[in-house]
Amino acid sequence: MRQREEKQLEAAVESLISRVAHVKNALHSFIHKLENEYERLTWPSVLDNFALLSGQLNTINKLLKNEKTPSFRNQVIIPLLLSPDRDEDLAKLTEQRVPVFSHEIVPDYLRTKPDPEVGEQEKQLSVEAARIGPEAAQKQIQTLNKLCSSLLEKLNNPRDDRDSESAAIRQNKPSFNPADTNALVGAVAFGKGLSKCRPPGPVAPGRPGQGPMMGGGPTLQQVTIGGGSSQQTGMGGPVAPQQQGQPGKMPSSIKTNIKSASGSMHPYNR
């Protein structure tokens, strides 16, 4: 009887190891695709990989729940030898994941309960869940169900409906400011709101005491006689009156002053 139970246990362990190896290979292949073939990977292919993993895990669950499979809960694993040295057989058996079976790693690999930190967090969540009354819990469940239903409806709607809704939203929402547009049109078409001041025009440099000269033509200046000295003024200044008795003739003193003034404007005299 004892030998029969041991044989059943060995067969169940071998079958379980084989199923777990299939899951490991499927995970390895899926991770390789995600890391190296993500550009060519499509969503249907991802769903196929998830479906394969789900089917393999269901097969393991069925194997563990089978009547012929002995209960692994009744089996106890006791470490017979702990050593800080490297164990080649153990490394080969675990594919180089566990090269040493020492006091540091045994509590992690042979643990039957969650970590103390995880266990403490689980207790806190259980206490908080117990504080919530049945009515509050029911309200939260209903709210969550509404959110899930709304999300499922949006996902199940055809893409054309979503595109039409987004287009309608874009049409109803203005993308410009009418006041700014009217102000811009008024400024361009009618000059509304523009400043009326003009910048001063360029002034050609000249000698001190001389008025501005117009480029490309002669400059006329009028001279007034006062106190025996001549003074030049710009255009638009007072005009010297002609002497009486000699209409149309210019006095000789004025001619001399004009001549001297024109001579000073000669380019070679500057």
Image (cartoon, helix red, strand yellow):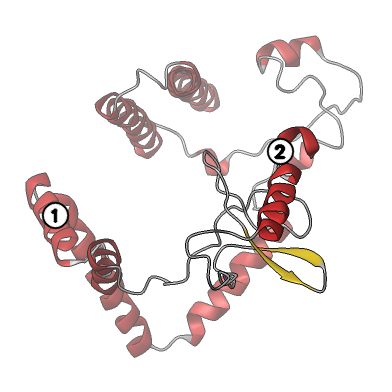
User: Looking at the image, which residue is at 39% across and 31% down?
Assistant: 60
Residue 35 horizontal/vertical position (percent): 50, 21
Q: Which residue is mark 1?
A: 167
User: Looking at the image, which residue is at 42% across and 72% down?
Assistant: 196
Residue 4 horizontal/vertical position (percent): 48, 23
- The mark found on residue 79 in the picture is none
Proximity of marks 2 and 1: CB atoms separated by less than 8 Å = no
Q: Secondary structure at mark 2?
A: loop
Task: Give amino acid for label 2.
Answer: His
Task: Give amino acid for label 1.
Answer: Ala
User: Looking at the image, which residue is at 64% across and 66% down?
Assistant: 121
In whole angstroms, how far apart are the C-alphas of marks 2 and 1? 78 Å
Q: Residue furthest front?
A: 245
Q: Quadrant of the C terminus?
A: top right
Q: Is residue 153 visible?
A: no
Q: Which residue is mark 2?
A: 266
Residue 55 horizontal/vertical position (percent): 30, 30
The quarter of the picture where residue 68 lies is top left
Disc 2 crowd rating (10 Å Cα; few below 14, some 14-19, many 20+) is few
